[in-house]
Amino acid sequence: MYSRNKEWVFVVLTCFFELCWVFGFTTASQWWHWVIVVFVIIVDFTFLTNACKTIPTGTVYAIFSGVGAIGSLLIDMVVFGKQIKLIEIFFVALIIIGVVQLKRADS
């Protein structure tokens, strides 16, 4: 039971670091910024790999991609003040629905 709870911590961490490197892609402007972004991506995928050791990969990926889609949209809105169009929300919702349905079809 402890191991499974630890793996869920890895899911939370991989989602957090995914949003960090997405933010980094938008803000990086010098070579050393890109070094940090690449480092964060490596850390992110390390946590992703650890999460998939006991939790089914489809479940981890569904959460990972859903948080990434919603989080990227929220970062654009909150941090960068971007006006989000209804069509963008629609397509993010389609991505999330697609990932969830793939997971349902797999089980």
Image: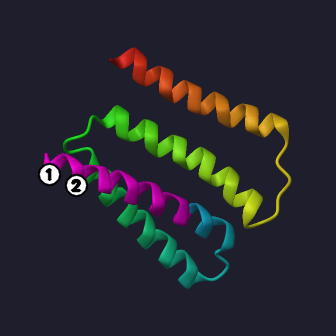
Q: Position of residue 102 (x, y in %)?
A: 45, 22
Q: Position of residue 11 (x, y in %)?
A: 35, 51
Q: Residue at x 62, y 46 (%)?
A: 70
Name the residue type under label 1.
Tyr
- Residue identified by numbered label 2: 6
Q: Position of residue 6 (x, y in %)?
A: 22, 55
Write down the quadrant of residue 23 in the picture.
bottom right
Image: magenta residue range:
1-21
As drawn, is 18 to the left or to the right of 70?
left
41 magenta-colored: no
Is there a contact, CB below 8 Å, between mark 2 and mark 1?
A: yes
Q: Is residue 60 above or below residue 78?
A: above
7 magenta-colored: yes
Name the residue type under label 2.
Lys
How many neighbours does mark 2 have within 10 angstroms: few (below 14), some (14-19), or many (20 or more)? few
Q: Is residue 27 above or below residue 55?
A: below
As drawn, is 78 to the left or to the right of 101?
right
Q: Is residue 56 above or below residue 104?
A: below
